[in-house]
Amino acid sequence: MIIPLIDSVIYTMLAATTPVVLAALGVMFTNFSGMFNIALEGMMLVSAFFSVFVVDITSNLWLGMIAGIGAATILGLSIFFICHYFHAEIFIVGMGANLIATGLTTFMAVQLKGSSSLIFENVPKLRRIAIPIIENIPILRGLSGHYVIDYLAIAISVICYILVFYTPYGYHLRTIGKDEWVAKTLGISITKHQFISYLWCGFLCGLGGAVLSLPVGVFLGGPVGMANGRGWLAIAVLCLGQENPLNILAAALFIGATSALSDLLQVTTSLSPRLLMALPFAAALIAIVFYMAKEHKTSLGIKI
């Protein structure tokens, strides 16, 4: 009884980690560039909608994934151009992008099917990948049976770590994050790196949004939406990870564990499901408070 329960918790933890860690890595790049992007919810939402919608039209998962990434990237680049060329306040533009994404996807869903929630029954869906040997080992079997994007998220975390700390691009990006004036004196193009950072953010948030809808062929619109607060959790994960991709992965796993615990308590206790759904957010807030108190921090290093 205990072993299957542990397997279930581990499986749920990894599944819940994927969209959060991808979005957190995306916002990490924008924070390094000095143009912190808070529109993660909106970017994941448009990706979730357009990815499953294009799959419904084309019956091609790859085209759907590309469409989701493209939609998230277009929204992100729109924020970049508005803030860079019209000198708009990035926080306000980001909030506006989240609201536009919510309204647009809900409107399109209602126009298409007459409901803010869409169920595409006959579309191809992402398949689970069984890992030989591991799938038969107790406790470890929770690591098997995930989607390709779940495993890709872990690999991307390692790639981002190498990219940020062991390449000239990463050195330039971290220099901008430390001091833009120093970066300019070194001949580093701030605008180019900000543009590239939003491309990274669009790609990663696009993947994070696609993994929400493509495995089940469903899109949920409305005020909460398919993202369901994961974008805000990603910002908390960035703060806890302190702009280190491996630390960000660890923080996302912590959030994933609280999500798994929330699901478990909903099944095994009579506590309010609405209350338990807030557990990951409460855990993220408490973790940030404890971290800041322990490190005597007065800020989280976020550049807005």
Image: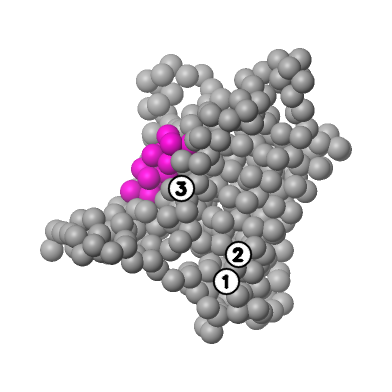
Q: Looking at the image, do the residues carrying marks 1 and 2 touch, with CB atoms under 8 Å apart?
A: yes
**Around disc 2, counting alpha carbons within 10 Å, would you say few (fewer than 14), some (14 to 19), or many (20 or more)?**
many
Question: Start and end of the magenta stretch?
Answer: 245-257
Circles 2, 3 touching at the beta carbon (< 8 Å): no
Q: Earlier in the sequence, mark 2 or mark 3?
A: 2
Residue under the point 44% across and 71% down: 127
Q: What is the quadrant of residue 71 in the picture? A: bottom right
Number of the front mark, 2 or 3: 3
Within 10 angstroms of label 3, few (less than 14), some, or many (20 or more) residues? Answer: few
Report the predominant secondary structure element of the magenta stretch.
helix
> Is residue 213 or residue 231 the one in the foreground?
213
Q: Position of residue 79 (x, y in %)?
A: 75, 45
Mark 2 lies on residue:
65
SS at badge 3: helix
- Kindly state the secondary structure of the residue where label 1 is placed: helix
Residue corresponding to mark 1: 61
The residue closer to the viewer here, 160 or 211, is: 160
Q: Which label sits on residue 155?
A: 3
Quadrant (top left/top right/bottom left/bottom right) for the C terminus: top right
State the CA–CA distance, disc 2 to disc 3.
18 Å
Residue name at image x 37 percent, y 54 percent: 14
Q: The residue under label 1 is which amino acid type? A: Leu
Q: Quadrant of the N terminus?
A: bottom left
Q: How is the image coloured?
A: one colour
Residue drawn 71% across and 15% down? 182
Assess whether residue 139 is covered by the magenta stretch: no
- Counting from the top left corner in percent of width and height, residue 119 is at 54, 78
**Residue 106, x across and y down, in percent:** 66, 67
| Mark 2: amino acid | Met
